[in-house]
Every structure is written in C-alpha cells, then in structure tokens.
Amino acid sequence: MTDAEDRATVDAMWRAADLTRAYLAEDRAMVEKILAEVDTDALDSILAWLIISHDELFDGLGEPSLSVRGFEAVAALAPPESEFAVTTAVRQVASGEIGLHAAVEDLGRREDQIHAVAICSTTMLLEAVSRTDALQMLDKDTAEYVRKGHPRPYTIT
C-alpha cells in the first residue's frame, strides 16, 4: 500500500467512526460536517469502511433486531438533503421489505448510502446496548487506531 493509499484508508476509518459517533451523540451539525468537502474516491472508501464495520457489529452483537422507530429516530439526524431518501430506505430495511445491501444500492447518491449504513450501525448499537456503552465501544476502537499509529488525520470545527 502506498503512503497516499494508507492516508486515504486512515481518513476513511476515522470518518466512518466519527460519523457513527455523531449519530450516537445526536450531533446533527457534526453529522453534516463529517462528509463536507470529501471527494468521490474518499466517499467510496468511507462507505466501504462503514460496511465492514456494520458487518462486524452485526456479527458481534448477535444479529440484533432493529425497530422502525429506532431507525427513524436516528435517521432524523441525517442532513436535510439526505433525510427523506435515507429514512425511506431504512424503513424498508427495518420492516423487512428489503435487505440493507439492496436498500443502499437503491440510493443514488454516495452520501445517502453512507448515511444509511451509519444509521443502521447506530441503530443496532442503540438497540443492543445503551448510548453510553455504544460511545464507550467506539472510544475503545478509536483508541486502538491511535495505539496502532493512526491518529485522526483531520480536524473538524
């Protein structure tokens, strides 16, 4: 892996974690800022990282059930330009109409796809553990990034 690819991967894993944290913390402003001014290649990497993280969570939490109400509460934090599409997609997933993969594929904008996966991951965490425990789990993961020599490569103000 080249230095540029390594930097891009580190940026993607941090943005995926920070987006999940913003949803967990119910910080709408931060949800919007995480993807601001991110290029298309970076969006692809963030989506890939979120999908990997989602799948690990799903397996690690024992395939938790997901409620429509839980999805809607988290999806309400999505940026206004994404909220309707994302809410519609996650409702379909929560009701069992379609799976997450199909719902995400049906969303046209990469940003919407990213928000949909982050919302699903956040909802799983909130339905399996408390908000505080979920944030502590995320803190543990990001502390591990730093311990492995991958500090957050950006600052969001």
Image (spheres, helix red, strand yellow):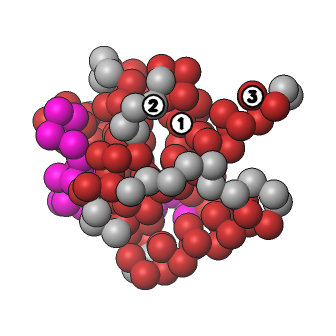
Measured from the top left, where is residue 1 in percent x and y? 85, 28
Residue 124: mark: none
Tell me the residue at 35%/30% (across/down).
111
How far apart are the alpha carbons under marks 1 and 3? 13 Å
Q: Is the C terminus in the top left, top right, bottom left or bottom right quadrant? A: bottom left
The reply to whether dot 2 and dot 1 touch (C-beta < 8 Å) is yes
Of the residues under marks 1 and 3, which one precedes in the sequence? 3
How far apart are the alpha carbons under marks 3 and 2? 15 Å
Looking at the image, is mark 1 or mark 3 nearer the viewer? 3
Residue 46: mark: 1
Of the residues under marks 2 and 1, which one precedes in the sequence? 2
| Mark 1 Cα shell of 10 Å, populated few (<14), some (14-19), many (≥20) | many
| Mark 3 Cα shell of 10 Å, populated few (<14), some (14-19), many (≥20) | few
How far apart are the alpha carbons under marks 2 and 1? 10 Å
Q: Which residue is mark 3?
A: 5
Q: Amino acid at mark 2?
A: Val
Residue 127 seen: no
Q: Which residue is mark 2?
A: 38
Q: Amino acid at mark 3?
A: Glu
Task: Give the residues in magenta.
Answer: 61-83
Measured from the top left, where is residue 69 in percent x and y? 18, 59
Looking at the image, is mark 2 or mark 1 nearer the viewer? 2
Observer-nearest of 136 and 64? 136
Tell me the residue at 33%/55% (across/down).
30
